[in-house]
């Protein structure tokens, strides 16, 4: 029996599900009989994309000229995931003692990805570390240890456990349209956005004044949030993002 052609079982009018790239962690990992470096990502990211109607594709760090351009040419959207601290050298600062070890591979790869995405006007959702990557990519800097600035640990009170706090969104912003004027979010970070990068506007804050979100002034859809919408209560934000990716619709159909 021959194989049924793909085009015969998929309607020509069926909308394509947007392809969303998600950056990954590169960590030592143990599974089965193996103990070795691995490219990984908490399943909550992919689950959130799927629930919003997208197809998630994992993007491990690549150190190769032109790789970011090749990847973005095949995607409808980009998620910059959370993770370790950005190397302060990337934004011209000395290292604070509280700053984590450099992740040179992730830094270079994700900075290239987000710059290319903005050039191509590919929708971007930048989460936690991701919003910091977005800011640094456009010339901004980072507060290396937030408790030294705000005087408390409420943004990351317990190691390995998400906390919750409210954020206030800017009237007229994409976030306000999706989440309302004030919303409760999942938080886990000791760093934060400092000086804003070019063409970025702060669009959410905590009551202590910490910048919790950025939006790009000229991109059709580029939003960064300091919190973790993939972990709790992020369906509306992911729906808005994946909807923007679907509307862009540049990925050719596979037939």
Image (cartoon, helix red, strand yellow):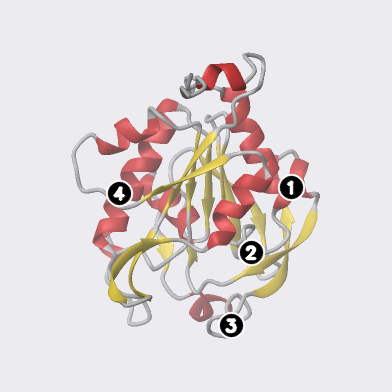
Q: Secondary structure at mark 1?
A: helix
Q: Looking at the image, is mark 2 or mark 4 nearer the viewer?
A: 2
Q: Nearer the viewer, residue 111 or 39?
A: 39
Separation (CA) of disc 1 from disc 3: 27 Å
Q: Are marks 1 and 4 in contact (CB under 8 Å)?
A: no
User: Does residue 133 appear in the picture of this structure?
Assistant: yes
The first of marks 4 and 3 along the sequence is: 4
Question: Total number of numbered labels?
Answer: 4
**N-term-proximal mark, 1 vs 4:** 4
Q: Which mark is residue 109?
A: 4
Residue pointed to by mark 1: 236
Sort mark 1 into few (<14), some (14-19) or many (20+) by Cα contacts within 10 Å.
Answer: some
Secondary structure of the residue carrying numbered label 3: loop
Instruction: Name the residue carrying label 2.
Output: 231
Residues at circles 4 and 3 in contact by the CB criterion of under 8 Å: no
Residue, far top: 12
Q: What number is the disc on residue 153? A: 3
- Give 41 or 169, whichever is nearer the viewer: 41
**14 relative to 184 in the view: left or right:** left
Asked if residue 172 is positioned above or below residue 42 in the image, the reply reads: above
| Residue toward you, 207 or 157 | 157
Gap between marks 2 and 4 measured at Cα: 24 Å
Nearer the N terminus, badge 1 or badge 3?
Answer: 3
Q: Is residue 218 left or right of residue 206?
A: left
Residues packed near mark 2 inside 10 Å, few (<14), some (14 to 19) or many (20 plus):
some
């Amino acid at each position: 029996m021959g194989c049924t052609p793909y085009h015969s079982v998929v309607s020509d009018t069926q909308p394509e599900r947007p392809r969303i790239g998600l950056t990954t962690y590169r960590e030592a990992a143990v599974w089965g009989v193996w103990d070795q470096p691995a490219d990984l990502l908490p399943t909550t990211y992919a689950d959130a994309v799927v629930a919003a109607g997208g197809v998630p594709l994992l993007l491990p760090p690549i150190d190769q000229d032109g790789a970011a351009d090749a990847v973005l040419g095949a995607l409808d959207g980009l998620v910059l995931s959370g993770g370790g601290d950005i190397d302060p050298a990337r934004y011209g600062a000395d290292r604070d003692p509280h700053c984590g070890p450099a992740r040179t591979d992730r830094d270079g790869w994700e900075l290239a990805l987000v710059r290319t995405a903005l050039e191509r006007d590919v929708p971007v959702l930048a989460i936690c570390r991701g919003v910091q990557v977005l800011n640094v990519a456009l010339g901004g800097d980072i507060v290396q240890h937030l408790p030294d600035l705000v005087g408390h640990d409420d943004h990351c009170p317990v190691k390995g456990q998400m906390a919750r706090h409210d954020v206030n969104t800017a009237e007229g912003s994409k976030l306000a349209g999706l989440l309302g004027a004030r919303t409760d979010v999942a938080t886990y970070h000791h760093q934060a956005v400092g000086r804003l990068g070019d063409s970025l506007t702060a669009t959410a804050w905590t009551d202590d004044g910490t910048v919790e979100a950025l939006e790009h002034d000229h991109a059709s859809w580029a939003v960064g949030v300091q919190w973790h919408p993939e972990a709790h209560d992020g369906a509306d934000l992911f729906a808005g993002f994946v909807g923007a990716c679907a509307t862009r619709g540049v990925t050719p159909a596979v037939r």
